[in-house]
Image (spheres, rainbow, N blue to C red):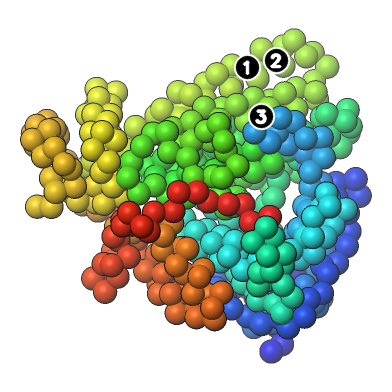
Amino acid sequence: MSMHIPFDNSYATLPDGFFTRLDPTPVKGARMLAWNTDLAQQLGIDGQDANVFAGNTVPDGAAPLAQLYAGHQFGNYNPQLGDGRAILLGEVIDQDGTRRDIQLKGSGPTPYSRMGDGRAWLGPVLREYVVSEAMHALGIPTTRALAAVATDEPVYREQGALPGAVLTRIAASHLRVGTFQIFAHRGEIDALRTLTDYAIARHHPQADGPLGLLSAVCVAQAELVAAWMSVGFIHGVMNTDNCTISGETIDYGPCAFMDAYHEGRVFSSIDQMGRYAFGNQPRIAVWNMAQLATALIQLFDDKERAVEEATAIVHAMPGQLQTAWLRRFGAKIGLAEATPEDQPLIEDLLAMMQAQSADFTNGFAALGTETARDQFTDRAAFDAWEVRWKARLPDTALMARTNPQIIPRNHRIEAMIDAAVAGDMAPFTRLMDALAAPYNLPDTYDDLRRPPTEDEIVPATFCGT
């Protein structure tokens, strides 16, 4: 089917040192598995073509390239990373006037592949498709999924041969903290200045210079991480190369949503020390912003003054995180204007959830209903908390708008992937339909709200690279 993508490319006009120009590597047997019609319309894309979104055909107006960046991975600096299995096809201006990247993931090797094959297998592609679209429906800033294409070329991982796939990811941009780090680390100040000017113009035009950019990104990341916490989301790999300047969630590798609440919950198989545990995410967000500050300071002649001002900006971020967290969790218990005096009420509920292994999503969704106390094993303790809570006259309508009834639970995602590998896309379609209405779930999807049984628990999630 013929199609048209209204490209309007800007990143490709930056100096060649920012990227490597190359086309995707073609694959055999491309066929469309999933297509996001609403998103395509928002982007002004007419029609669909599996060969375009598999990388077999480069559409008119595209400027394919692999982006360069560096990053701290689990606290250790890697001087060069880059798009090792992704190609930025180009950009479009959507119907809201926002510039969006169109990127293929799993599109073949690039100069940044570091001995990798540049491919993706079906499981991680469908996981990112489901979770990113679920995050969008939850109202949390995120990259989005436009298409998932299956291929006839197997991808080899530790498990053996797996079905190949390519994901088309849409982002406000793919600028990361690590994009700034590589030029700062190399001492390429002109490139760093060009990148900073570009990032300000594209994402934070109100920002006054490099430190204004730092301040804006700190606010965006504080709001983002508070939003993650409010739905029990664990990113799993908060490296600086996975931290966007736009404030969008990016890279859904070993991510997971909690079932039973625990502040120390870790799912990522590569996070052996719990660096990116649920409760550590605010601290890591601040650490990442400190790395951005370190890069931007290189733009100033008066380094001492720049360090002082940047330090003040980063040190303000924990307070911003706490304010955003209190607003989010206050709303979850029906308080439109939660105050610091309400924080013990929220923290006591979370402590009770953790001590009694209560389900995070269902526990909050049940508040104010007859089934609320059934979420807890120590019902007397919940009853005592409920008396304190009701004294604050919670707004149940606010709670209904902020407490999702459904999340993409790990065991449901794994079951969906197993079915898709076997050729059955029906569980994927049903899960996507349910997740599209997280705050107003039809009764026909009630089974998808159920926490996993003991034998359904998914103890670890994986990157898929």
- What's the residue type where badge 1 is placed? Thr
**Dot 3 alpha-carbon crowd within 10 angstroms: few under 14, some 14 to 19, many 20 or more:** some
x%, y% of residue 284? 56, 30
Q: Nearer the viewer, residue 115 or 82?
A: 115
x%, y% of residue 446? 26, 67
Which picture quadrant has residue 98?
A: bottom right
Pointer 1 residue:
311
Q: Nearer the viewer, residue 9 or 20?
A: 20
Which mark is on residue 260? Answer: none
Location of residue 99 with respect to 368 vertically, above or below: below
Residue at 19% across, 51% down:
366
Pointer 3 residue:
75
Pointer 2 residue:
307
Location of residue 211 with respect to 232 vertically, above or below: above
Q: Are marks 1 and 3 in contact (CB under 8 Å)?
A: no
Marks 1 and 3, Cα distance to the nearest angstrom? 19 Å
Residue at 28% across, 67% down:
447
**Dot 1 alpha-carbon crowd within 10 angstroms: few under 14, some 14 to 19, many 20 or more:** some
